[in-house]
Image (cartoon, rainbow, N blue to C red):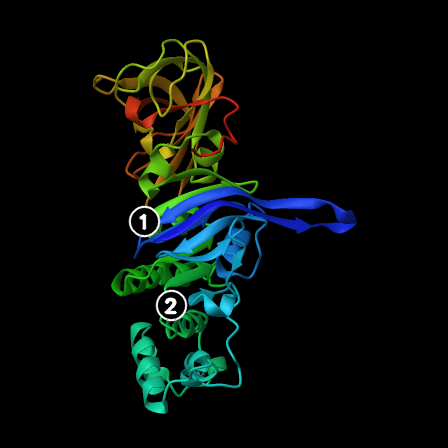
Amino acid sequence: MLSVRSLHTDYAAAGGAVINAVQDVSFDVPDGELFTLLGPSGCGKTTTLRSIAGLERPRAGAIELNGRVVFSSDKRIFVAPNRRNFGMVFQSYAIWPHMNVFKNAAFPLEVRKQRPSRKEIEQKVMRVLETVQLADLAGRDATKLSGGQQQRLALARALVMEPQLLLLDEPLSNLDAKLREAMRFELKRMQRELGLTTIYVTHDQSEALALSHEIAVMNEGRIVQIGSPRDIYERPHNRFVADFVGTTNFIGGRMVSANAGNGRARVATALGELSVQCVEALPKDAAVVVSVRPEDVELTEAPPAREEGDNICVGTVAAKVFLGDYLDFQVKVGDSVLLARVHPSLRTPVGHAIHARMRAEKCVALAEGAAARVAA
């Protein structure tokens, strides 16, 4: 297991100011799992990864892998990057252009202090090239590979050292959208088959949701929520997470009743009184925002059958956009506008009345002003 505890990493800025790039970051990653650090540019995710790799020296904290301490401020331990046995793939693949595929993958073995025999090198390299599906291209010049193939070669070069931990820093960001999507499946397959403990850094929420066992959302140097992809998406702890991970509707309101035993409550909003789900205790009269994902706003032309916990309102289609496998509707309800994502078979014209249903378990009440609340 990888354990990161109370990590602080600072930078000296121009004029002598200190930038707190990473502040009190803690998390655990079980063996064989892929853990993603997700957040906007400048949130501290890459600095956290570089601190784990040993490329940055934190001011405080501890980093331990399978019982081996590689950094501890209290014990004054700092293991050099080349002695940590961690593999790393950067945003730019740094492929050696004067070498072919085989030699690029073999390079880390050939320069290591205890160099394996030529036969061992060949066996190890061909095994990882098979894993990344490049064995047939072993003799090809690296410059003649496609972007996706270069990305896989960079992975092969990291895997050939048989690392205890794989660190990936936005490895798909240089690929076009279609290739990036295909490579997500490849990465997921390889990581699961090899059982490699992996830390993945990205600002792309779709990537994080598709690949991860667990996600840590970061903002301003801190972790604001840790959870499974489904938890992060369906039960955000604050407005920042709800807004950053996917698209959502925010409906302002005030608590009419405190949390029931099942986490349900009532909120007074411009759409009327809504039945909602609470992820934390919120008192009566507290100012809140209700987050509802567009795909959870169900639209029908006829009044829907009401079930317990349903929130139903009537509005007017203000606009709609056809996006192939779904339609985005903007529905005006009073002075508010709801975004709904529905099947393209719904053809209600702009200007016509439409019914919107939102189930209580899909309406998440968040404390207003909780945008930067730090994960416990």
The location of residue 287, given as percent across then percent down, is 48, 15
Q: Residue at x 59, y 49 (%)?
A: 59
- Secondary structure category for the residue under label 1: loop
Q: Residue furthest right?
A: 15
289 relative position to 191: left or right: right
Q: Is residue 30 above or below residue 120?
A: above
Circle 1 sits on which residue? 213
Between label 2 and label 1, give the one nearer the viewer: 2
The residue that label 2 is drawn on is 163
Q: Secondary structure at mark 2?
A: loop
- First in sequence, mark 2 or 1: give its number: 2
- Residue 105's x, y, as percent? 42, 79
In the picture provided, is 43 more to the left or to the right than 212? right
Q: Quadrant of the C terminus?
A: top left
Q: Position of residue 114 (x, y in %)?
A: 42, 82
Task: Give the Cα separation between the discs numbered 2 and 1.
Answer: 20 Å
Q: Amino acid at mark 1?
A: His
What amino acid is labelled 2 in the image?
Pro
Q: Residue at x 30, y 34 (%)?
A: 346
